[in-house]
Image: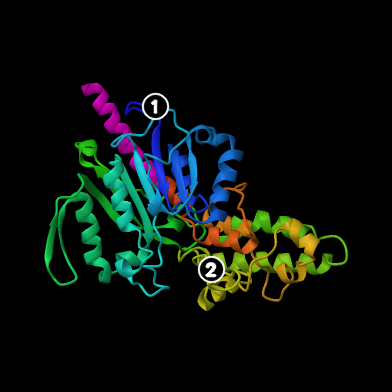
């Protein structure tokens, strides 16, 4: 593999169900590896990479590795490529490292949380020496209490001084990168019908950046996409199965009630959020079945005409199990299906999730919205393209 290849390559750790991978793929990156420890999410990745024609390059070159990222050796575990990856050849190393250490919903233990994988990400940067690095996390990491930890991470990448826990100042020479920006992007600014702020770090190798200017992504949507706009096609598909027969009157009334309530909420909040959804959460394996989040989130969903007390069965399973009373005709409105949760998260229709309903929903709730990943990916690939053209002219 050489640096003059026509493609721009990427490796992604903590890939989940593919939200970031979809976005980076749309931006123009070709994945060499997707590393994910959860077996259901890894199967989701394998299933979709193999199924979609637009992923033909990955079908030949991408390894979906179901493993702990701490055990991932990119020079040993990549098997599909015709030649061995060398340090400095990879274009982008990306990852949505686990958010619980910094989430407002957790204890915010930061680097003291055993799930903190920033150190592993830095170790892989040192090993791979990619041209660019992209790290995604929750907005909580930008809180003042984590300022010294952010300085540590920036110093490890770009060089600088940070303070140890005992107050001692430590200098690190860095790995030769420039941290172009570490800031928050709001998913609703990019067409995702959800309140989902994410903290994104973009770093580019100094010898690649040189005189090229990095441009932070700008919003693609002036007005947010509302829940009613995003979900109306699939909600109609679900209800119309019952528009004839013994439940026809109730189904028609329930559908109209949902649509009217969600439409009214969107109109009420026009210019103030546009009737978007609260943040979806994936939940924890330690807790029970899937739902739409804490009490405050459930209350917000209720204002949008949706019951947040659980997740509905898919259309075909609803018919088989006869769960329409719970899923569609409840007094608090319809529950969302996994597919509808994926739409709220910005996934394209047709992306299939593996595992049982709860496992599928957790994959959706923990995902990075593809449209946001695409926007950041495009901002990075523009720099890489400009740098490649510059270097080829100078060669």
Residue 351 placement (x, y as % from top left): 59, 48
Residue 116 placement (x, y as % from top left): 35, 63
Check residue 6 in the rendering and tell me which mark sits there, or answer none.
1
Asked if the magenta segment contains residue 56, the reply would be no
Check residue 127 in the rendering and tell me which mark sits there, or answer none.
none
Q: Residue at x 13, y 61 (%)?
A: 170
For label 2, the SS is loop
For this view, does 233 lie left or right of residue 125? right
Which of the colour schemes (rainbow, by chain, secondary structure, one colour) is used?
rainbow
Q: Which residues are magenta?
A: 377-395
In the foreground, 73 or 257: 73
Q: Residues within 10 Å of mark 1 (few under 14, many from 20)?
A: few
For label 1, the SS is loop
The quarter holding residue 111 reads bottom left
Q: Residue furthest right?
A: 245
- Distance of mark 2 from mark 1, alpha carbons? 42 Å
Residue 20 visible at all: no
For this view, does 84 lie left or right of residue 307? left
> Which residue position is annotated with label 2?
285
């Amino acid at each position: 593999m050489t640096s003059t290849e026509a493609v721009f390559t990427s490796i992604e750790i903590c890939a989940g169900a593919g939200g970031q991978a979809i976005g980076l793929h749309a931006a123009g990156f070709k994945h060499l590896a997707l590393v994910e420890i959860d077996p259901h999410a890894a199967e989701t990745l394998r299933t979709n990479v193999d199924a979609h024609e637009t992923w033909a390059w990955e079908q030949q070159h991408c390894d979906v590795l179901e493993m702990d990222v701490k055990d991932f050796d990119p020079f040993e575990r990549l098997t599909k490529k015709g030649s061995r990856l060398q340090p400095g050849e990879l274009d982008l190393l990306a990852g949505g490292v686990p958010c619980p250490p910094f989430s407002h919903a957790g204890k915010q233990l930061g680097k003291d949380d055993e799930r903190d994988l920033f150190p592993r990400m830095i170790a892989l940067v040192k090993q791979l020496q990619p041209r660019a690095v992209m790290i995604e996390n929750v907005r909580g990491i930008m809180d003042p209490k984590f300022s010294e930890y952010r300085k540590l991470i920036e110093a490890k990448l770009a060089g600088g001084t940070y303070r140890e826990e005992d107050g001692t100042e430590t200098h690190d020479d860095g790995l030769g990168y420039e941290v172009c920006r570490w800031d928050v992007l709001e998913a609703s600014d990019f067409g995702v019908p959800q309140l989902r702020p994410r903290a994104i770090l973009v770093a580019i190798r100094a010898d690649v950046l040189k005189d090229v200017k990095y441009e932070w992504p700008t919003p693609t949507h002036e007005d947010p996409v509302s829940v009613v706009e995003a979900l109306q096609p699939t909600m109609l598909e679900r209800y119309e199965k019952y528009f004839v027969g013994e439940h026809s009157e109730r189904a028609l009334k329930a559908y109209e009630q949902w649509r009217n309530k969600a439409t009214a909420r969107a109109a009420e909040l026009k210019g103030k959020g546009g009737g978007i959804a609260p943040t979806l959460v994936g939940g924890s394996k330690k807790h029970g079945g899937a739902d739409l989040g804490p009490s405050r989130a459930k209350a917000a969903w209720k204002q949008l005409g949706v019951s947040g007390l659980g997740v509905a069965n898919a259309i075909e399973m609803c018919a088989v199990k006869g769960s329409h009373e719970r899923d569609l005709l409840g007094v608090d409105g319809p529950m969302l299906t996994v597919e509808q949760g994926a739409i709220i998260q910005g996934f394209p229709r047709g992306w299939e999730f593996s595992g049982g309903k709860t496992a599928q929903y957790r994959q959706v709730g923990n995902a990075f919205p593809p449209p946001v990943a695409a926007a950041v990916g495009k901002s990075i690939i523009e720099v890489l393209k400009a740098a490649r053209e510059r270097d080829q002219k100078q060669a």
